[in-house]
């Protein structure tokens, strides 16, 4: 951010007259004071400039977070049906944070603003709109709040972070939160979610990459490591770099300094109080929040009431096989890359996180054979 001086033409004019009179002489003290006053009141004004709005500050003032700040503190970035809504509701309850919505409307006589729609940020070129919304939100909240947004499919758009930083360099400090889930259970949840509003093809038609996707649902989206690689937080092999360049859409290494928090949805359902407290302690530390989190504040996992699609049915065995094979690769990748702690990446409830990754290597439906037995009993 640069500091520029803006001299008005009037300021230059009166300064030049003052210099001329001083040279010629014969000027009265009253006249001198009058011109000096004009010169001072049209003196250069200094402003701190941002890419979106100019705010007048004292040039020597320490830069701290104020209501005029228009940068994003945290970003709940994905994946869909991986607890992003649960995280959003969690941060809405935390006194030190606030979630920003795309559209606003006044609610009630007190003029409070209710946020009603999440961002599809740069997918629709809304990055500049975002920083304006943060300004709107900041006027209705305490100036020390941390502002964030939720966009579950952001990881599918490699330019998101790069473009945010292009708008304001301070977005290098935006904290990123990424949730994952057992690939089989993720597919079932996402498929059922889309069934609420769309007619979906048979599940086996969605095996593959984005080219087979319907409303964002395809088995390849659960290969989480392919999307995580873009942040450049770990060393990548030539093969992994090739995977990035061949990914659809093409992905390049960002190597941004943004800190990342990782979790799995299954952790939200953990009834072990000690592990829940550990998870929340890690989250509070990552977010630099002073408020004390207790296990009863654990984000609650949302579930779709509509369960028309049951992935454990025998007819979906092929889909499950692909998802489990991908899950093994993904789990092994995260276990290998994060066997040692990395400064820029915080794993919530680290030990439990890695225990849950082990379950991704197995089909969660193996115990659930009753539905298959029922089907067989109806056969002649």
Image (spheres, rainbow, N blue to C red):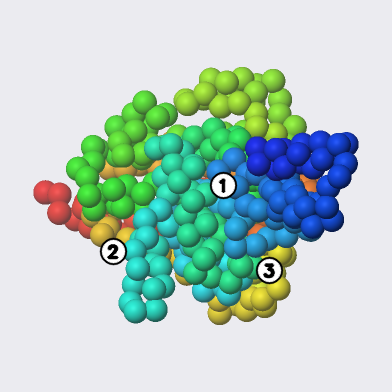
Q: Which mark lies nearer to you, 1 or 2?
A: 1
In x, y percent, where is residue 34?
Answer: 75, 55
If you read the primary sequence from the N terminus, does the residue marked by circle 1 or circle 3 appear first?
1
Q: Which mark lies nearer to you, 2 or 3?
A: 3
Residue pushed farthest left? Answer: 380
Say few, some or many: other residues with alpha carbon within 10 Å of mark 1 (under 14 / 14 to 19 / 20 or more).
few
Tell me if residue 183 can be seen.
no
Q: Is residue 326 left or right of residue 81?
A: right
Residue at the (83%, 47%) spot, across then down: 27
Which residue is labeled 2 in the image?
A: 305
Under circle 3, the secondary element is loop
Marks 2 and 3, Cα distance to the nearest angstrom? 34 Å
**Quadrant of the drawing holding the N terminus:** top right
Query: CB under 8 Å between callouts 1 and 2?
Result: no
In x, y percent, where is residue 64?
Answer: 73, 60
Under circle 1, the secondary element is loop
């Amino acid at each position: 951010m640069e500091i520029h001086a803006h001299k008005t033409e009037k300021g230059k004019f009166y300064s030049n007259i003052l210099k001329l009179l001083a040279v010629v002489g014969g000027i009265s003290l009253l006249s001198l004071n009058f011109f000096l006053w004009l010169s001072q009141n049209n003196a250069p004004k200094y402003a701190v400039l941002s890419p979106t709005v100019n705010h007048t500050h004292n040039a020597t003032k320490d830069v701290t977070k104020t209501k005029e700040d228009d940068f994003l503190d945290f970003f709940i970035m994905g994946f869909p049906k991986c607890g992003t809504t649960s995280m959003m509701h969690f941060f809405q309850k935390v006194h030190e944070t606030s979630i920003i919505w795309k559209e606003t409307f006044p609610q009630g006589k007190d003029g409070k603003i209710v946020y009603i729609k999440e961002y599809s940020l740069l997918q629709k070129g809304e990055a500049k709109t975002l920083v304006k919304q943060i300004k709107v939100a900041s006027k209705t909240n305490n100036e020390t709040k941390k502002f964030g947004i939720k966009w579950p499919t952001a990881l599918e758009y490699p330019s998101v972070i790069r473009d945010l930083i292009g708008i304001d360099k301070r977005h290098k400090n935006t904290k990123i939160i990424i949730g994952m889930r057992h690939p089989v259970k993720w597919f079932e949840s996402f498929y059922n979610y889309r069934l609420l509003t769309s007619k979906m093809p048979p599940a086996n038609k969605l095996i593959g990459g984005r080219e087979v996707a319907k409303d964002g649902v395809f088995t390849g989206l659960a290969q989480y490591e392919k999307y995580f690689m873009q942040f450049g937080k770990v060393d990548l092999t030539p093969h992994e770099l090739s995977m990035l360049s061949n990914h659809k859409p093409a992905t390049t290494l960002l190597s941004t300094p943004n800190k990342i928090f990782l979790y799995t949805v299954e952790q939200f359902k953990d009834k072990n109080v000690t592990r829940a407290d550990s998870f929340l302690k890690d989250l509070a530390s990552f977010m630099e929040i002073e408020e004390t989190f207790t296990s009863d504040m654990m984000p609650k996992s949302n579930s779709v009431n509509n369960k028309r699609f049951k992935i454990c049915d025998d007819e979906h065995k092929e889909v499950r096989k692909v998802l489990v094979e991908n899950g093994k690769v993904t789990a092994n990748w995260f276990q290998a890359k994060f066997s040692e702690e990395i400064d820029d990446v915080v794993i919530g409830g680290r030990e439990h996180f890695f225990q849950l990754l082990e379950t991704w290597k197995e089909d969660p439906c193996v115990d659930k054979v009753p539905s298959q037995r029922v089907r067989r009993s109806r056969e002649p």
